[in-house]
Amino acid sequence: MSFSSPYFTLPRFRYIRPKSVSEALSLLEKHGEDARVMAGGVGVINMLKERLMDPKIIIDLKGIPELHHISNGNGELKIGATTTLNELLRNDVVKNSYPALWEAISLLSDHNLRNRSTLVGDICEGMPWVDSPPPLIAYGAKLEIVGPKGRRITPVEGFIKGMAQVALASNEIVTAVTVPAPPSDSRGRYYKFSKGSEFGLVNLAMVASGYESGYPKEVRLVYGGISDTPIVADGVTEIFRNLPSSRRDSPSEIINSALKWVTGSVQPMDDNLASAEYRKNLVEVMTAQALREALGRR
């Protein structure tokens, strides 16, 4: 979003607060492109103020009880679409079992906005700098989506298609995020570099697991803020998966090998927040820090 909007008021629209998912879907079907859904509304209100959208109907999901929940069981964490970020920060399962996600949420916006903001809303904005997609992708999270054709499940990875573009039809609603339970030896961290604003120039989620003799067999690095879509460092994952059981490589050699892949494959963007060269330096520094933590070296 820009910081130069001349508007301080909202455009005119009709506000509807349905009581069920089926009612919300009926409203979307009836009004089509004239309607927009909001869960927390923080992103939607900003876009309305800046005239980046001009819907005739706003459908507020906050009044739907079935969308407001956090449940942990059957090998996964399930988060309803209207669950607020502050509710997630207060949840011990999120804090203890999904530390990369918890850290990302703690750095997302501020306390007052987190009382309204939701995880689903953050994802559906589809903005490069939003904090939640990298850790969710690193943990293998999926989205539960309902529409006229029924229910479907899709990974968070690949859901964001570009700037403010997501793989969601205008008559569909994201109802929940599900995150599989990580292995018991899992380590997770989230790193964010920003310059005096909530927008990260580089965001990085790291999740590592499968430790043998102090070395992880599975390492997932996911970058945000450096491209229109989150970037998964698949090459780094393969490096750790292919480590010999003898572990003859030293930690510094493993990190250097991973950095070589990252610097050759991850190409940050230029924008009005930072140059590609500046971001590239940040990516290298933050990647080295993340891998040192994955290997137990601070």
Image: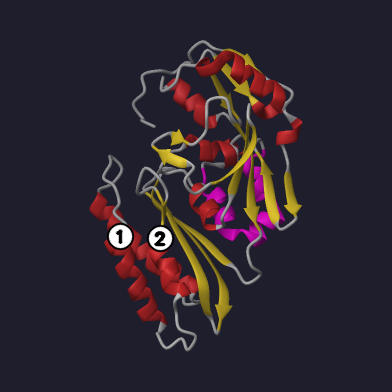
Q: Residues within 10 Å of mark 2 (few under 14, many from 20)?
A: some
Q: Which mark is residue 265?
A: 1
Verify CB contact (< 8 Å) between mark 1 and mark 2. Answer: yes
65 vs 190, left or right, is right
Q: Residues within 10 Å of mark 1 (few under 14, many from 20)?
A: few
Q: CA distance from mark 1 to mark 2?
A: 8 Å
**At 63% across and 52% down in the image, what residue appears?**
179
Residue 148 x %, y %: 63, 26
Residue 259: image quadrant is bottom left
| Residue, disc 2 | 233
Q: Nearer the viewer, residue 153 or 179?
A: 153
Q: Amino acid at mark 1?
A: Ser
Q: Which mark is residue 146?
A: none
The N terminus is located in which quarter? top left
Confirm whether residue 63 shows in the render: no
Give the mark count.
2
Q: Compared with residue 98, is residue 19 higher up or lower down, i.e. above or below?
A: above
Q: Nearer the viewer, residue 117 or 180?
A: 180
The region drawn magenta spans 83-108
Q: Amino acid at mark 2?
A: Ala
